[in-house]
C-alpha cells in the first residue's frame, strides 16, 4: 500500500493531494501538464519536501512532517526514471547500469544484471555511450539502471514523453513485462489515457494540484471528472473481459464481459487472456427496438440507469449491460426523439471495430 | 633544489617549471573547494568571500608579495609559526616563490573550475541520489568527472601563467639565482646587466614559446576530455 497525503504551497501553485493505492501494481498519476504530477512524484522520491504531510510505503514512514521524519533520498530505495532519462554521460551504458547496482549491495536482491539486460533487451547497447542512443533506448537504460538499484518502488515520470509516438512501442512492451514479471510497485505519471489504459491497475486523477478521483481504471473511467481532463471525445467506459473465441482470419475475437459476450476486432491476444478495452461513449449507439440489417456486430440488451448533461451540449447516458456499466454520448435531439428515461430497456449497439486500438493485454492476476 | 646547470637559461627554465608545478599542485584542491563553495553554498558574506578570492587579479602583484611577506616572513605571525613548528621557510625560497605564484594564479584557476561546475547538470546528481549515492560519493563519482574539463583548463592556464609570475615572486621570494630566479626574473636581470641583451632576447623567446605551448596544450586537452565525457 502506498499512502500519500501532502501539502506543498508555492507562489502560483498549490499541491494538496491525498491518495492510497494497493501495491504491487501500477499506480497511474493522470492529469494535464501542470496538474502537479511531477511535484507529487518528487515528493514521494524525497527530492522535494512537502510543507506538511506524510508518505508511507507499506509499513514504513518515508516522510512525516509532524513526526519530523524525512528519510534521505539515497536511503529510500525508490527508483526514479526521469522524463529526460538523465543517464551519466561519462559512463557507458554498462557503467550506468552498474552504478545503482554497486550501491545496493545491502538491499534484498530483486533482480540481477543479466536478468535486467535480457528483460530490457540491452545486450547490444552495453558498450555504448548515452549520447549514441535513441530516445527509446535511453529510457530503457534508465529503467534498467533504476531496477538494478533494487528499488521497493519505481517512479516513472512520463517516460515516453520525449519519444516519438511511433517509437513508443520500443518501450511500452518492456513496461508491461515488468508489471507482469516483477512484483515491483510502480507510480506512472502520464497525460495520455491510452498509456493508463494499457498499463495501470489504479488511477489517481489530478487537476490543479488536487485529486479529482481515484480507484481502479474501470471505476475512474465512469467518473464525470475524467471528462474535464481528457475532453468529451475520449470519455468511455473501460471494460475487462476474457477472450473465449478467436478468429485469426478476420481478426475478430469474442469476449465474455460481465454476463454477456462482446465481439471485437482484436489481434495478437492468446485465447483465455484477460483484456481491457474502452468503448468510447461517442461510438456507442442506442436503439429502443431490435434492429435488423445493420453492420453493427453487437446489439446488447441493456437498461438505462442515469442520464446527465455532459457540459459540451450533449448527453451522457449510463447503461447497465449484463452487470457492466457502459456510457453512451448522444445529442439532446436524440434523447428527445427516443424519450429515454432511467429504467428504460434499450439496445446498446457497439461496432466491433470501434473498440480497436483500445484493447490491451492485462496481467493474469496472481 | 640548488643544482646549477651552468646555463642561466636552463636554470631559469627549470626553476620556472618547478615553481609553476608546485604552485598548481598546492592550489588545485583548494581551488576545487573554493569553486564549490562559491557555486553551491549559500551563506552570508559570500560576495565578500568571492571578492577576496579575486583580489590578486586587481591588486598590484608587488602589493600581494608585500602582504605575503607580512604574513609569511621569517618573523611574521604565520611564517614564524611554520618555522618553529615545521622548520618550513617560505620567504626567499623556491617554496615561497611557488606560494606567491599560487596566490597570484588562484583566481584564474577558480574561475575555470567554477564555470565547469556551473555547467554540471544537477539533475544528474539527483539521479545519482535516487540510485543510493550519498553526498561525497555523488561528488566523486558524478560531479568531479563532469568538472574535469574545467579543472584541467584551470590547472594548465594557472601553470602557464605561473611560469611568468614576476611582481609577487620578486617581492616575497627575492631574486636568488638557482632558488627564486625564474624566467621573468632572469629576463629582468639580464636586461639590467650591461651586455645582457642577447641573453634577454633568448629568455624572452623562451617565455613566448612556453606560453604559446601551454595555451595550445590546454585547448587540446580540454577538447579531448570533453569527447571522453561524451559531450
Image: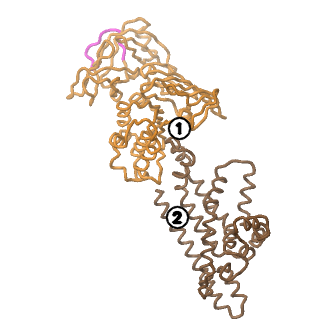
Distance CA(mark 2)–CA(mark 1): 36 Å
Pointer 1 local density, CA inside 10 Å: few below 14, some 14–19, many at least 20: some
Pointer 2 local density, CA inside 10 Å: few below 14, some 14–19, many at least 20: some
Callouts 2 and 1 close, C-beta under 8 Å: no
Question: Magenta segment range?
Answer: A285-296
Query: Is any part of residue A166 visible from this angle?
Result: no
Q: Note whether B58 is above or below B35 in the view shown.
A: below
Q: Note whether B32 is above or below A257 in the view shown.
A: below
Query: Is any part of residue B135 visible from this angle?
Result: yes
Q: Note whether A354 is above or below A260 in the view shown.
A: below
Residue at image position (30%, 25%) is A353
Residue highlighted by disc 2: B222
The image quadrant of residue B110 is: bottom right
> Chain B is which colour?
brown
Left or right of B204: which side holds A227? left
Does the stretch in magenta take in A286? yes
Numbered tag placed on residue A75 in the rendering: 1
The image quadrant of residue A251 is: top left
Chain designation of label 1: A
Residue situated in front as seen by the camera: A155 or A165: A155
Does the stretch in magenta take in A83? no
Q: Position of residue A22 (x, y in %)?
A: 46, 23
Secondary structure found at label 2: helix
Amino acid at each position: 500500500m502506498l499512502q500519500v497525503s501532502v501539502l506543498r504551497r508555492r507562489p502560483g501553485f498549490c499541491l494538496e493531494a491525498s491518495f492510497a493505492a494497493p501495491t504491487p501494481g501500477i499506480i497511474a498519476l493522470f492529469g494535464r501538464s501542470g496538474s502537479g504530477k511531477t511535484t507529487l512524484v518528487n515528493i514521494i522520491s524525497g527530492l522535494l519536501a512537502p510543507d506538511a504531510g506524510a508518505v508511507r510505503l507499506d509499513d514504513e514512514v518515508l516522510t512525516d512532517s509532524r513526526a519530523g521524519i524525512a528519510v534521505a533520498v539515497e536511503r529510500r530505495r525508490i527508483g526514479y526514471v526521469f522524463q529526460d532519462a538523465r543517464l551519466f554521460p561519462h559512463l557507458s551504458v554498462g557503467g550506468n547500469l552498474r552504478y545503482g547496482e554497486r550501491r545496493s549491495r545491502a538491499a534484498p536482491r530483486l533482480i540481477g544484471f543479466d536478468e535486467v539486460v535480457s528483460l530490457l533487451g540491452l545486450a547490444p547497447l552495453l558498450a555504448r555511450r548515452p549520447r549514441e542512443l535513441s530516445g527509446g533506448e535511453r529510457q530503457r537504460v534508465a529503467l534498467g539502471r533504476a531496477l538494478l538499484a533494487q528499488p521497493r518502488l519505481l517512479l516513472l515520470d512520463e517516460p515516453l514523453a520525449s519519444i516519438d509516438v511511433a517509437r513508443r512501442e520500443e518501450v511500452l512492451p518492456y513496461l508491461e513485462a515488468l508489471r507482469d514479471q516483477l512484483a515491483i510497485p510502480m507510480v506512472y505519471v502520464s497525460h495520455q489515457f491510452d498509456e493508463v489504459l494499457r498499463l495501470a491497475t489504479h488511477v489517481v486523477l489530478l487537476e490543479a494540484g488536487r485529486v479529482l478521483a481515484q480507484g481502479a481504471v474501470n471505476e475512474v473511467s465512469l467518473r464525470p471528472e475524467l471528462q474535464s481532463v481528457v475532453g468529451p471525445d475520449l470519455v468511455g467506459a473501460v471494460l475487462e473481459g476474457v477472450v473465449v473465441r478467436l478468429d485469426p482470419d478476420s481478426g475478430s475475437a469474442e469476449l465474455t464481459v460481465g454476463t454477456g459476450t462482446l465481439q471485437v476486432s482484436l489481434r495478437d491476444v492468446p485465447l483465455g487472456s484477460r483484456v481491457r478495452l474502452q468503448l468510447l461513449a461517442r461510438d456507442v449507439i442506442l436503439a429502443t427496438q431490435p434492429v435488423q440489417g445493420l453492420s453493427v456486430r453487437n446489439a446488447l440488451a441493456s437498461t438505462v440507469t442515469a442520464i446527465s448533461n455532459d457540459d459540451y451540449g450533449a448527453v451522457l447516458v449510463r447503461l447497465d449491460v449484463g452487470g457492466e456499466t457502459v456510457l453512451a454520448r448522444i445529442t439532446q435531439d436524440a434523447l428527445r426523439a427516443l424519450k429515454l428515461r432511467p429504467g428504460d430497456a434499450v439496445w446498446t449497439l457497439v461496432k466491433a471495430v470501434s473498440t480497436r486500438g483500445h484493447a490491451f493485454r492485462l496481467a493474469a492476476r496472481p | 633544489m640548488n643544482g646549477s646547470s651552468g646555463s642561466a637559461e636552463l636554470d631559469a627554465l627549470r626553476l620556472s617549471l618547478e615553481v609553476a608545478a608546485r604552485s598548481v599542485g598546492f592550489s588545485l584542491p583548494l581551488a576545487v573547494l573554493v569553486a564549490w563553495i562559491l557555486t553551491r553554498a549559500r551563506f552570508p558574506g559570500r560576495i565578500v568571500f568571492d571578492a577576496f578570492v579575486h583580489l590578486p587579479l586587481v591588486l598590484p602583484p608587488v602589493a600581494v608579495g608585500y602582504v605575503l611577506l607580512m604574513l609569511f616572513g621569517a618573523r611574521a605571525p604565520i611564517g614564524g609559526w611554520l618555522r618553529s613548528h615545521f622548520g618550513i621557510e617560505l620567504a626567499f625560497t623556491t617554496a615561497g616563490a611557488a606560494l606567491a605564484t599560487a596566490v597570484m594564479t588562484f583566481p584564474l584557476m577558480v574561475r575555470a573550475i567554477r564555470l565547469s561546475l556551473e555547467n554540471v547538470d544537477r539533475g544528474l546528481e539527483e539521479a545519482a541520489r535516487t540510485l543510493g549515492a550519498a553526498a561525497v560519493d555523488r561528488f566523486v563519482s558524478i560531479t568531479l568527472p563532469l568538472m574535469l574539463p574545467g579543472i584541467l583548463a584551470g590547472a594548465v592556464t594557472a601553470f602557464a601563467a605561473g611560469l611568468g609570475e614576476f611582481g609577487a615572486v620578486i617581492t616575497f621570494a627575492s631574486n636568488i639565482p638557482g632558488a627564486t630566479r625564474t624566467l621573468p626574473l632572469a629576463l629582468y636581470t639580464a636586461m639590467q646587466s650591461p651586455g645582457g641583451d642577447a641573453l634577454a632576447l633568448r629568455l624572452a623567446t623562451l617565455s613566448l614559446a612556453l606560453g604559446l605551448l601551454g595555451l595550445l596544450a590546454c585547448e587540446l586537452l580540454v577538447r579531448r576530455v570533453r569527447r571522453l565525457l561524451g559531450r
